[in-house]
Structure formats: structure tokens, C-alpha cells
């Protein structure tokens, strides 16, 4: 159950990123994922980005992750590859995206645990996702999961509601997304009739300003994540709360700073109540 739920939530997280404003005007020449991926493979690498942990004086401690990014001519991300280093393992994420911000192919893997997952989107000519197919290998086990997308549209042909669902063995997972002005404002994740998470987002002139996500276990609130964004829709601060014995306790707070090009420059993470603080900086290498 944990594996299937985890896989499904990765899909939801990636599929529900904030979309570009020109989504309705997108017209793809082909919906063949292999052809779209092949075209993206021909694009040059535009950026290499390293996330580095530093001490309070700015001295390097270790490289936390490395990112490789390709852009379309309009500066929208076409390809993203990230390798994160944690607990002696390399966690690898690879995404191919069309210009409206939807992914068409995503791969994740963990060499240490011999785990790999591939997700392929079924799309129409406007870039709307119609469904997903997930393939994964876990040690000696292989499996395939189909994920269904069911939309409701308003009279302007804007999305009002989306139910993303999958069923495997005795596990039924549904993710309900409600839209306003084609932006996701409310989300519910339901596993076997139990609500496991609720999220809400606030937009101002189509730009994300704040979001809240709450996780539940056996009907009890366990974790709350609050995030706040700048006028460009980039995160500037966040907090994580836990609820032992039903009481809210702040566990972590983070702040994000950007350079003159509005690129993420540094992150400060403070863990409470022990006041452990970690500092990270981003190193941009352009080709």
C-alpha cells in the first residue's frame, strides 16, 4: 500500500504544478510522446545548477544535488534532470515537459535500493493530460499501474474539477482537484475512502501567493505545511508543523532568497526546537 500510494502521489505532485498562462493557446503538432521526447533531446543544455550545503561562514560542506535544465526558446522548461545525494544514495529525477508545463515523461530511480519508475502521459493536441501509465521495478518485482483522469469543464471550457484515480489490488486512490480560473485551488487525496491530505492555494492575478497542505492519519491531523510566494510565484518562506497529542508544534521554517535574475540564490532551514540551522547556496553554471 505504501509503495502504490507513494507512486501515485509523485504523479499528482508533478501533474499539478502551476501551469503557464498560455495553456489554452497551445497546439501540439503531435501527441506522440516518443516524437516529443526525441525533439527535446535535440535541444542544448542551458543550465547546470548545483545545490551546496555551506556553514554559517559560507564554507562548503557538501554538494546536496545537481540539476541539468533545457529551455524552449520562450524560456519555459523543456527538460529537467536532478540527482540528489542523501543517505549514501543517489535519487534521480528526470522530466520531459511540453510548453504548458505538463510533463509527458518522468523517470525516478534509486540505484542503492534497485528501484526505478517511469511515468508516461497520454495527452491531446492542447497538452491536456488524459491519463498516465506507470511502470516500476522494485528489486525483482515489476508492475504497471494505469492512472485515470476525469475532468469537468465550465462553459468557457476551463477546468472546474479533476479526479485522478487508480486502483491496485485492494487499494483505491483518488485525488480530487478543484479549479478557479483554471488554477488548482483545492485538493483532496483519498485512499480507500480515508482522506489522507487536503491542500489549498491562493492566487492573485493568476500568480500563486500562498499554499497550505495538511496530512492526516486515521482521521487525525499529523502535519501541516505552509508556503508563501513572491510576485513572480516563487517560494520565499515556508513552515512545517506537527501535531503530537493534537497540539500544533512548529518543526521547521525555511527562507528562500533570489538574485537579480530572480533565480534561487540561497535557502536557510531552521529545525525546531533544537535550533539546528542548515544553509544552502545555488551555483549556476551556464553552457
Image: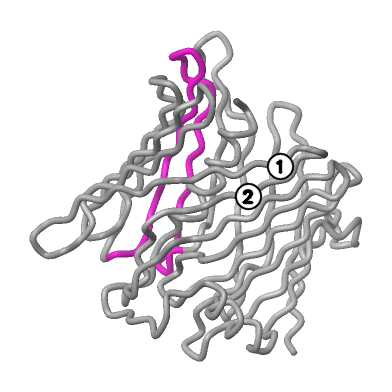
Q: Is residue 188 above or below residue 111?
A: above
Q: Left or right: where does residue 88 sit relative to residue 159?
A: right
Position in image of residue 66 (x %, y %): 78, 66
Helix, strand or loop for the magenta stretch, by majority: strand
Residue 279 x/y as whole percent? 76, 53
Q: Is residue 20 left or right of residue 58?
A: left
Disc assigned to residue 142: 1
Q: Which mark is residue 133?
A: none
* Residue at 75% from the left image edge and 52% from the top image edge: 109
Q: Are marks 2 and 1 in contact (CB under 8 Å)?
A: yes
Region in magenta: 206-233
Q: Looking at the figure, which quarter contains the C terminus?
A: bottom right
Distance (Cα) linking label 2 and label 1: 8 Å
The image quadrant that residue 35 belongs to is bottom right
Q: Earlier in the sequence, mark 2 or mark 1?
A: 2
Q: Position of residue 281 (x, y in %)?
A: 75, 64
Which residue is denoted by mark 2 in the rendering?
A: 135
Secondary structure type for disc 1: strand
Few, some or many C-alpha atoms within 10 Å of disc 2 (few <14, some 14-19, many ≥20)? some
On whether residue 188 falls in the magenta region, the answer is no
Residue 230 located within the stretch drawn in magenta: yes
Label total for image = 2
Which residue lies at the image location 66% right of the left edge and 58% below the top edge?
A: 107
Q: Would you say 286 lies left or right of 228 here?
A: right
* Relative depth, front residue between 254 and 9: 9
Question: Residue at horizontal 39%, vertical 38%?
Answer: 175
Sort mark 1 into few (<14), some (14-19) or many (20+) by Cα contacts within 10 Å: few
Amino acid at each position: 500500500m505504501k509503495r502504490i500510494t507513494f507512486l501515485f502521489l509523485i504523479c499528482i505532485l508533478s501533474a499539478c504544478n502551476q501551469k503557464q498562462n498560455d495553456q489554452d493557446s497551445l497546439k501540439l503538432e503531435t501527441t506522440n510522446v516518443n516524437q516529443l521526447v526525441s525533439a527535446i533531446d535535440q535541444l542544448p543544455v542551458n543550465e547546470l545548477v548545483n545545490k551546496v550545503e555551506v556553514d554559517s561562514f559560507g564554507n562548503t560542506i557538501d554538494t546536496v544535488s545537481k540539476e541539468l535544465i533545457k529551455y524552449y526558446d520562450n524560456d519555459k522548461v523543456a527538460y529537467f534532470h536532478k540527482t540528489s545525494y542523501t543517505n549514501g544514495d543517489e535519487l534521480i529525477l528526470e522530466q520531459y515537459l511540453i510548453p504548458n508545463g505538463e510533463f509527458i515523461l518522468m523517470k525516478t530511480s534509486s540505484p542503492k535500493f534497485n528501484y526505478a519508475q517511469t511515468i508516461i502521459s497520454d495527452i491531446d493536441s492542447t497538452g491536456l493530460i488524459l491519463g498516465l501509465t506507470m511502470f516500476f521495478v522494485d528489486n525483482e518485482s515489476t508492475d504497471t499501474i494505469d492512472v485515470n483522469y476525469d475532468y469537468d469543464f465550465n462553459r468557457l471550457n476551463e477546468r472546474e474539477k479533476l479526479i485522478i484515480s487508480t486502483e491496485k489490488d485492494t487499494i483505491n486512490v483518488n485525488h480530487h482537484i478543484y479549479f478557479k480560473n483554471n488554477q488548482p485551488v483545492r485538493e483532496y487525496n483519498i485512499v480507500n475512502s480515508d482522506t489522507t491530505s487536503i491542500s489549498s492555494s491562493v492566487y492573485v492575478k493568476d500568480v500563486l501567493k500562498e499554499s497550505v497542505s495538511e496530512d492526516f492519519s486515521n482521521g487525525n491531523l499529523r502535519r501541516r505545511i505552509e508556503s508563501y510566494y513572491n510576485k513572480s510565484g516563487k517560494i520565499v518562506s515556508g513552515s512545517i508543523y506537527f501535531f503530537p497529542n493534537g497540539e500544533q508544534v512548529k518543526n521547521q521554517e525555511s527562507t528562500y532568497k533570489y538574485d537579480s535574475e530572480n533565480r534561487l540564490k540561497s535557502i536557510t532551514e531552521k529545525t525546531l526546537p533544537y535550533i539546528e540551522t542548515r544553509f544552502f547556496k545555488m551555483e549556476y553554471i551556464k553552457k
